Image (cartoon, helix red, strand yellow):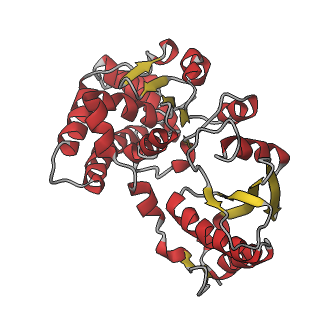
Amino acid sequence: MAAPETQLMLSIGLIEKDVNADTLWVWCYPSVSAELREVLLSKCCLTQDSQGLNTFVTFSVQEPSALKKVTHFSLVVTAKDFNPEKYAAFSRVLCRMYIKHGSPVKMVEGYIAVLTKGICQSDENGSFLIKDYDVRKAYLAGSVKDVVSQFGMETIILYTALMLKKRIVVHHPRIEALLEFTRALPALTWHRKDWSILHPYVHLADSELENLRTCTGYVAGFVDPQVSNRPDLFDVYVNLPDTEITVSQSAKEAMAMGKLHKDIGLVIVQSAEDADRTDGQVIKDISIKTREILANLASLAEDCENSKITLETLKQRHFPPATENFLFHLAAAEQLLKI
């Protein structure tokens, strides 16, 4: 039986552009809701209002092919985990099958083979082995060093927002830049290893925004500059083209900076600017500092009733105001606060 990671896939779907230039959702297995289909179609490069980037694995149909009335098609894989390289590789294998046979049947066979055995083998169309794609590699593929090179000490704002599970919105007109930047941010809070907070390419559509509102905290990417006029969507706004970070008025109290933040910021910047240190080593340096803070917080909780921290507990320790404020909100984010 295949490892549990094979059960992370939810579905595959097919979007086609035909000789009449019509783009349609034509097939899926086992199922995709009508609402999700609309969202996926809006992000497909085959639709007229798309930005041009192949957000899904897309093939141009060349002769000879079994697909006579199709000029291009995109394959969509939905899954529970974050591993773009894994699903891109698997999608390319399935796409080659579709070009050769012109029927989704072979794709379903390949999909089921990966679900049950973790492998899809084909001499003609390439092979895919799920265990070749460690999720840690996907987590480390984003560059924290690049983030720090852009924002320097201001990276501490992003770190603080992530630690406190705040809502971060990132804007850039190019999808490629959004995907590259946003995928690196969850690594700043490596102790959680939570890439489910990542929504790298969001439209200002009601259905997508409603989904965002159900999240406690997130990192959401937008190509539409109008998102800057939607303070209801963010606590921290990152304007990537102008290298600017803005904290919303409603989040300023929780995000107030002090000596502790400066110390953490220096750790981040000094590690990231060391040319001899890899991204993995930088993430480890940040993680060590984070665990030190969390250990202190856990120690405070142990002395409290039901291991839950109160504001009074923090006041008794006579922390500087900004440190007390940060620890109070961090305790809430880590579910260590007595409510």
**Residue at 48% in and 31% down:** 172
Query: Quick one: quadrant of the C terminus?
Result: top right
Q: Is residue 98 left or right of residue 127?
A: right
Q: Nearer the viewer, residue 110 or 124?
A: 124
**Residue at 56% in and 62% down:** 88
* Above or below: residue 211 compared with residue 78: above
Residue 40 visible? The answer is yes
Coordinates of residue 121 in the picture (x, y in percent): 61, 84
**Residue at 38% in and 26% down:** 326
Q: Nearer the viewer, residue 276 or 298?
A: 276
Q: Nearer the viewer, residue 186 or 24?
A: 24
Q: Which quadrant of the figure has residue 202?
A: top right
Coordinates of residue 101 in the picture (x, y in percent): 75, 77
Coordinates of residue 246 in the picture (x, y in percent): 42, 19
Residue 260 visible? The answer is no
Q: Which quadrant of the figure has residue 244?
A: top left
Q: Is residue 58 left or right of residue 84?
A: right
* Above or below: residue 15 compared with residue 338: below
Q: Is residue 266 left or right of residue 58?
A: left
* Above or below: residue 237 compared with residue 294: above
How many numbered discs sit on the rendered protein? 0
Q: Which quadrant of the figure has residue 301?
A: top left
